[in-house]
Image: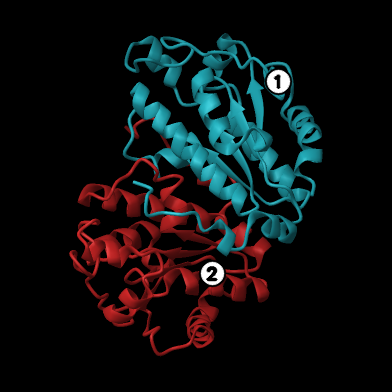
Chain colours: A red, B cyan
């Protein structure tokens, strides 16, 4: 289907120029972890910190993506892969505009995270694994989903009835049950600062 | 499928803040017209002009989108609608990051353009119709597609074997067979300047 198609990146302002205008190096900061592990909280706190320090960024979240570009996808295995594929492609578009992109998705399996990394490109992919104990996530239960999963109302719920494969080599791992939000943001900032600075 | 999902826009830096940082009002500038009508040329020239004037923008093009987010779509009627739906959703994400977004797609029918407009929002959608005579487009034939369409190698080719419905109320219409590139860019800039200025 791509026979009649050729990329136009050379004809339009490229990432390098846009990064220079924004004075930053665009990366994808990818949060992975269970529901309730703190992904959304840290994503929005990291975004605030980055704006405060004059970096320009955008959060992509299961919630804002699922109501938009992915509103025609369900939660089957095939749809979950397509969900991540589209998120990764959108992230890639965003870093091509020079934008630091913060992704906050459970992304429970190696296959899913590898797919994202392969689309985005290894150099541009920074993986942060939020790893509090399941009991803490379940106790937080910010959207009441664990309760529904335990009651059998939600099938295939990650951590309860569907596995979460811990990333083998994340760039950073944080147990958010013991690390306060501010300290977590500082840790993340410390490992990304060199990579997002032009 | 959205039962367990609620938008997070309120919890993250919103469009208003990002527009203030970029000092611009984000809009989608949507080029429609036949293959060879000058969409890509004007999109990239408009982008250069906007950058020169310190506006920040991104071009989305049938070519760069088809090799990325839409690389699993063909050219059936259903896929064409899904193609535009995703493009419109990506455009909406981009304007929510404060970015002026220039879309360059044939988008041949009222249904397709209405779908895009309804997703993006009427206030944020500026429609530019490039309207040189078909003969001129066919003569330019930048990718050799008209030749293939006439030879029957490409089926359902807009303008040859598939209809193009002229937009009824575009914000601007340009006959690029008589209007030079620089004048076209000036015309476009003149009708958008008030709407992209904060």
In which quadrant of the rendered image does the N terminus of chain A lie? top left
Which residue is located at x 58 percent, y 33 percent? B40
In which quadrant of the rendered image does the C terminus of chain A lie? bottom right
Which residue is located at x 61 percent, y 72 percent? A48
Which residue is located at x 33 percent, y 23 percent? B76
Which quadrant holds residue A169? bottom left
In percent of width and height, residue B191 lies at: 78, 31
Q: Is residue B112 left or right of residue B127?
A: left
**Marks 2 & 1 on one chain:** no
Instruction: Count neighbours of disc 2 (C-alpha within 10 A) and say few if under 14, some if 14 to 19, many if 20 or more.
Output: many
In percent of width and height, residue B145 lies at: 43, 21
Mark 1 sits on what residue? B174
Disc number placed over residue B128 in the picture, else none? none
Q: Is residue B149 left or right of residue A165?
A: right
Which chain is home to disc 2?
A
Q: Are marks 2 and 1 in contact (CB under 8 Å)?
A: no
Instruction: Count neighbours of disc 1 (C-alpha within 10 A) and say few if under 14, some if 14 to 19, many if 20 or more.
Output: many
Q: Is residue A132 left or right of residue B22?
A: left
Which chain is home to disc 1?
B
| Residue B40 visible at all | yes
Give the vertical position of A192 relative to B44 (above or below). below
């Amino acid at each position: 289907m791509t026979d009649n198609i050729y990329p136009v990146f050379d004809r339009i302002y490229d990432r390098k120029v846009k990064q220079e205008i924004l004075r930053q190096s665009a990366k994808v900061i990818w949060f992975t972890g269970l529901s309730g592990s703190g992904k959304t909280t840290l994503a929005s706190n990291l975004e605030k910190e980055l704006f405060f320090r004059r970096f320009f960024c955008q959060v992509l979240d299961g919630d804002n993506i699922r109501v938009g570009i992915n509103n025609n996808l369900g939660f089957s295995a095939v749809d979950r892969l397509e969900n991540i594929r589209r998120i990764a492609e959108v992230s890639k578009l965003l870093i091509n505009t020079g934008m630091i992109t913060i992704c906050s998705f459970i992304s429970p399996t190696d296959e899913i995270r590898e797919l994202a990394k392969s689309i985005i490109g290894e150099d541009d992919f920074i993986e942060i694994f939020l790893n509090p104990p399941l009991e803490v996530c379940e106790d937080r239960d910010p959207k009441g989903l664990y309760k529904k999963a335990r009651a059998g109302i939600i099938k295939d719920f990650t951590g309860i009835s569907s596995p979460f494969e811990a990333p083998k080599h994340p760039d950073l791992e944080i147990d958010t049950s013991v690390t306060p939000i501010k300290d977590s943001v500082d840790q993340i900032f410390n490992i990304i600062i060199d990579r997002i600075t032009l």
